[in-house]
Amino acid sequence: METVKNLKTKIRSALKRQGTYSRDLEICIGMVAGSYYAFLLAQTDIEKLTCSYVEEKTRENNIKLVPHPAFKTLKDSQESVRKGLRELGLTLSTLTVDDEDELGKLIDDVESVK
């Protein structure tokens, strides 16, 4: 799974490819990367579910079926990512780096060194 650090790097790279990167955008980059990471986590959780609900007990000790919390997280994080990317002038498609892209290879090489 992606890391927040890796997502920040991809966002910065996309901004630099567009010629719109500025250090002033780092806060927004961090927020978008964090929201996208939350989206990915919720998506992973949802993929593991066998049903879309959880059971809760009411004050009267009755069982109530409610939507699984991961669905709310997914919806909220989707909206945050969409808005954040729009503020940065990006789309999800601008974040994807082609495997044949030299910049993408450089990013992968740099991140593999720890």
Image (cartoon, helix red, strand yellow):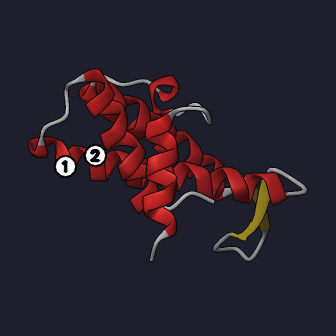
Point out residue 95 in the picture as x, y percentages from the top left corner. Answer: 46, 33
Viewer-side residue, 113 vs 65: 113
Q: Is residue 65 left or right of residue 99?
A: right
The residue where tag 1 is placed is: 26
* Residue occupying the point 58% across, 46% down: 74
Please name the amino acid that badge 2 sits on.
Ile
Q: Is residue 39 left or right of residue 53?
A: left
Viewer-side residue, 102 vs 43: 102
Circles 2 and 1: CB atoms closer than 8 Å: yes
Please name the amino acid that badge 1 sits on.
Glu
Point out residue 37 in the picture as x, y percentages from the top left corner. Answer: 50, 54
In this view, the residue farthest toward the right is 50
| Figure label count | 2
The residue where tag 2 is placed is: 29
User: Is residue 69 placed above or below 36 in the rendered structure?
Assistant: below
* Residue occupying the point 29% across, 31% down: 15
User: Is residue 17 placed above or below 4 in the rendered structure?
Assistant: above
* Residue occupying the point 49% across, 41% down: 104
Q: Quadrant of residue 94?
A: top left
Say if residue 67 shows up in the picture. no
